[in-house]
Image: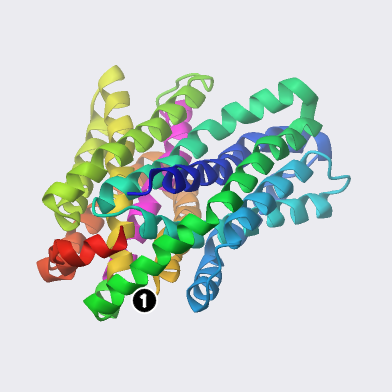
């Protein structure tokens, strides 16, 4: 495992995803600054989701066609520059353009970084990739806190402060590109020796599983705070702490699940993690007080704990298209999950928040049922001889 390049890729992941985690927390300040309607605020999030998630496969396709390691610093620069510009945008249209710029930076970074991380992790692939994944999860959790710090230092225009750490991270990534290039060459030799075919049917099934997981996770982050206020009649101030706990638990779940996947296999880890989610959601809905909070936090940990194994499995199903596979696992499915949550929002208007949360239990159960279809031979890459894997080191 090449620890320094992996650490820098994870820090870049953290930096990019801070912008994604901070944007929702920025909405009330943008509303006050521009007198925005709820439709205009929703459009801000829609532009971010489309540019950062739905278009990721396009950049993954480009990354797989030719060596594109320069996309790493470019993605960081665009993500932080776009976010920095949000606070100084003089008009709503320019605000949307800044959001789009930041989203494109995220879409550029994720596929290339995931591919490069796969090149540098060595034999303990799930453990190494969990470090990379945890960077993004931690970034999302830190986003609202970083935003508060920037606002405290410079008001809404203080968003420009993110350029300072972003520039340092981009320069560090530039410095590590030669090491990543050497790791990529070794990886290509391993692939040539392995000659595993792509598995499009298995990849289609995996996309369906991850989409269902994305619907559940996005649904928790969207509807649980609303449920706490409007159904459980709790104060709104506790929602920030609750969301931070869920996001933080996701980061911990990523770190814990990586070594487990290396020991027991990716399919088993995915199935076990997802199987716990419906139980935790039911416990949240039925249990009182602190037990319900613990259940929803654990649901976040189990959901995100399956992130690294699904990412690695996707790359194994498309061994010659690592960036595209990563884009499908990270961005495309997140975009589909966002669409699913939007539809559930309409269901909530009609049937209520309790019905929607029980619907999430059903979607989580569907994810478990689909995971049973991941055949043991679908994880054949786990049995690749050690001497072949070692060529990637």
From the image, tell me which residue sits under label 1: 320
Secondary structure predominantly adopted by residues drawn in magenta: helix
Residue 312 falls in image quadrant: bottom left
Q: Is residue 391 visible?
A: yes
Residue 5 is left or right of residue 166, and the answer is: left
> Residue 115, image x and y in percent?
43, 62
Magenta run includes residue 146: no
At x 44%, y 70%, the residue is 324
At x 22%, y 76%, the residue is 194
Q: Between residues 161 and 88, which one lies in front from this camera angle?
A: 161
At x 60%, y 62%, the residue is 70
> Residue 41, image x and y in percent?
69, 46
At x 27%, y 30%, the residue is 295
Q: Is residue 19 above or below residue 68?
A: above
In the image, which residues are magenta?
204-231
Residue 309 is left or right of residue 151, and the answer is: left
Q: Is residue 181 above or below residue 2?
A: below
């Amino acid at each position: 495992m090449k620890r320094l390049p992996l650490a820098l890729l994870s820090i870049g992941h953290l930096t990019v995803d801070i912008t994604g985690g901070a944007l929702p927390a920025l909405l009330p300040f943008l509303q006050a600054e521009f007198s925005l309607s709820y439709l205009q605020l929703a459009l801000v999030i829609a532009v971010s989701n489309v540019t950062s998630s739905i278009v990721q496969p396009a950049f993954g396709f480009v990354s797989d066609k030719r060596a594109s390691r320069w996309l790493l610093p470019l993605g960081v620069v665009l993500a932080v520059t776009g976010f920095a510009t949000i606070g100084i945008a003089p008009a709503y249209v320019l605000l949307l353009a800044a959001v789009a710029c930041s989203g494109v930076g995220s879409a550029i970074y994720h596929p290339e970084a995931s591919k490069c991380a796969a090149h540098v992790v060595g034999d303990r692939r799930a453990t190494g990739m969990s470090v990379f994944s945890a960077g993004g999860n931690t970034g999302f959790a830190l986003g609202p806190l970083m935003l508060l710090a920037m606002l405290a230092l410079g008001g809404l225009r203080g968003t420009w402060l993110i350029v300072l750490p972003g520039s340092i991270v981009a320069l560090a990534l530039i410095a590590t590109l030669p090491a990543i290039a050497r790791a990529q060459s070794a990886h290509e030799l391993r692939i040539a020796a392995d000659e595993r075919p792509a598995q499009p049917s298995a990849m289609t099934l995996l996309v369906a599983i991850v989409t269902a997981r994305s619907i559940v996770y996005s649904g928790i982050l969207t509807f649980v705070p609303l449920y706490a206020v409007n159904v459980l009649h709790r104060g709104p101030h506790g929602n920030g702490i609750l969301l931070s706990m869920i996001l933080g638990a996701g980061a911990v779940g990523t770190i814990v699940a990586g070594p487990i996947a290396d020991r027991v296999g990716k399919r088993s880890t995915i199935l076990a993690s997802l199987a716990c989610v419906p139980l935790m959601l039911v416990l949240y809905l039925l249990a009182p007080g602190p037990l319900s909070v613990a259940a929803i936090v654990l649901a976040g940990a189990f959901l995100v704990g399956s992130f690294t194994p699904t990412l690695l499995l996707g790359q194994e199903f498309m061994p010659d298209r690592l960036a595209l596979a990563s884009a499908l696992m990270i961005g495309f499915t997140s975009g589909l999950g966002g669409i699913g949550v939007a539809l559930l929002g309409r269901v909530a208007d009609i049937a209520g928040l309790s019905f929607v949360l029980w619907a999430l239990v059903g979607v989580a159960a569907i994810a478990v049922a689909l995971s049973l279809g991941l055949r043991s031979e679908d994880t054949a890459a786990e049995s690749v001889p050690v001497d072949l894997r070692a060529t990637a080191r």
